[in-house]
Image (cartoon, coloured by chain):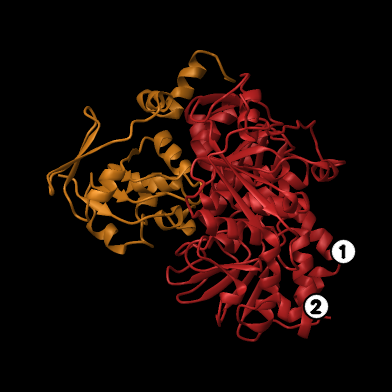
Chain colours: A orange, B red
Amino acid sequence: MPRAWKYGDNVDTDVIIPARYLVTGDPARLGLHCLENLDPEFLQGRQPGDLIVGGRNFGCGSSREHAPLAIKGAGVSAVIAESFARIFFRNAINIGLRVYESPAAAQGIRMGDEVEIDEGSAVIVNATRGERYEIVPLPPFVQEIVSAGGLMAKLRQELQRGGAAS
Amino acid sequence: MAMTLAEKMLADRSGLREVQPGQIVETPVDLVMGNDITAPIAIKEFEAAGATRVFDPERVALVMSHFVPAKDINSADQSRIMRQFAKAHQIKHYYPEGTGGIEHTLLPERGIVVPGDIVIGADSHTCTYGGLGAFATGVGSTDLAYAMATGRTWFKVPESMRFIYSGKRPPFVTGKDLILRTIKTIGDDGALYRAMEFTGEAIADLPMEDRLTMSNMTIEAGGRAAIVPTDDLTLRYEQGRAQRPWRLYAADPGARYVAEYEIDVSKLEPQVAFPSLPSLTRGISDVGDVLIDQVFIGSCTNGRLSDLRVAASILRGQKVHPDTRLIVIPATQDVYKAALREGLIEVFVEAGASVSTSTCGPCLGGHMGVLGKGERCLSTSNRNYVGRMGDREAEVFLANPAVAAATAVRGRITDPREMSQEEAV
């Protein structure tokens, strides 16, 4: 079962992926440096499917889309936080990184807990502690972008309909 | 319904009579912007989605700013994607190195962004243009790609906060000090998802360059956008500069703000943000003895002509402290040229500063002044996060250009008011 990597408030995009690595858009290459300024152990210990759990204002700072790309490239399946910085949240939705706002989960989950996300029931299940946390639902418009497969999938549909410049 | 500035602008441009916070609107954009870090990803997305032309080559700005002149082979290769795209799509506002500078200084300075514009830019400091009375916000590369193809984007209408600044600013208290103090007051996420309206007599009295500096750092409080109400000063700034007609908006009396703050600027002194958050700000009297290895004067926050003028006024006839190094980077080519004409560049070079062509460079730890382990930098830029300017054990302090210049001379964080009494000519 996926394990949680738990951090505090204001995890900024400079610690998620330092600017010196922004010379590529390749998630796999970016993922090699994900969180290295915050927690060098993360890169050594992460397993595919693990989750990152933050506190308030996760992803604050730069608009670099490389930040959610690096998290995805590191094999992380989802990010849970008490709150997200606006640009990071939007970027994550756009590139198909799963992000969940849940103050209860952000407070309840500890480093290394085994955690699963039950999308259907909109709850996060903490198997280690036997706790369940509600997810704050996405606005319907944003849910549509997610369901379409991201913003570029939406653009492709629009272009095929001949709506935009094509 | 009475509306705030952000609500009025979004309603008007989305073709709606009124909007409410939380509502999703789809809005045409007046300008979309990308830089050499964010645009290459957007261009790949744009092409992969099957788009073949931009919605309007005159409404796309592509500015080489972050890693130029190319800092290494990878960044040179990445920049080439943008150079080729700009040429192929005949992008009007394409500025390679040597012609433009840092986008957030360049676009207002050249009148490419004007009051009342709706702007998205793939850089978080796009909020800078709020100083002109534009609604401008940072997005990622995918949103940029979508808007380059369609000329549209979507917004969740933000709640608005109002800040009322009263009193007269004491000497060496600038827009930078007002915004650092504001971030200290509300916290690093104090304006999360919200628009910040800056009003009051101290704003009416604030030069445009300082209004842009204040708006620039709203993202450091999590803000979606800053908006300074347009006034005579805005219109004087735009005369002979604006490349397009502007639109003037005013907030309605009785508009609803989720929070209001009053700040008396007459009691402020220069502010210094301590590592590693902008909210960890203190008045300079409470700084204590902090030795500094490197001082950086530049960036989209404080690399404008007025910033270089005040720094030069302190550095004229002085030398940079032997244990400190000073880097000065004019934010744009036009700032550089004006600084040359005014003799400011000579002052910096004579003082022992490294002066470089316009680039974001050291602000984001890119190049031109990266910090080593345990080094301390006082910077006029906007972020002091862990590892922002180099090694994760380096420390960054944020302040205005007068504090920076005084600090460069003394080698420790220094109140410029001391310098003007003892050393300045």
Query: Furthest residue to the top?
Result: A161
Please tell me the numbered disc located at residue B398.
none
Distance in Å between CA atoms under marks 2 and 1: 15 Å
* Residue A130 in picture, x, y percent from top left: 12, 44
* Residue B78 in picture, x, y percent from top left: 54, 48
Q: Is residue A77 left or right of residue B66?
A: left
Task: Report the chain holding disc 2.
Answer: B
The residue carrying pointer 1 sits among few (fewer than 14), some (14 to 19) or many (20 or more) residues within 10 Å by Cα, namely few
* Residue A70 in picture, x, y percent from top left: 38, 48
* Secondary structure type for disc 2: loop
Between B129 and B189, which is closer to the camera in this rendering? B189
In the rendered image, is residue B101 in sight? no
Whether residue A146 is situated above or below residue B171 in the rendered picture: above
Q: Nearer the viewer, mark 2 or mark 1?
A: 2
Query: Furthest residue to the front?
Result: B254
Q: Are marks 2 and 1 on the same chain?
A: yes
In the rendered image, is residue B13 in sight? yes
User: Looking at numbered disc 2 in the image, what kind of residue is underneath it?
Assistant: Arg
Residue sitting at 72 percent across and 81 percent down? B418
Q: Quadrant of residue B71?
A: bottom right
User: Looking at numbered disc 1 in the image, what kind of residue is underneath it?
Assistant: Arg
Residue, disc 2 = B316
Residue, disc 1 = B341
Residue sitting at 78 percent across and 72 percent down? B312
Q: Is residue A99 left or right of residue B131?
A: left
The residue carrying pointer 2 sits among few (fewer than 14), some (14 to 19) or many (20 or more) residues within 10 Å by Cα, namely some
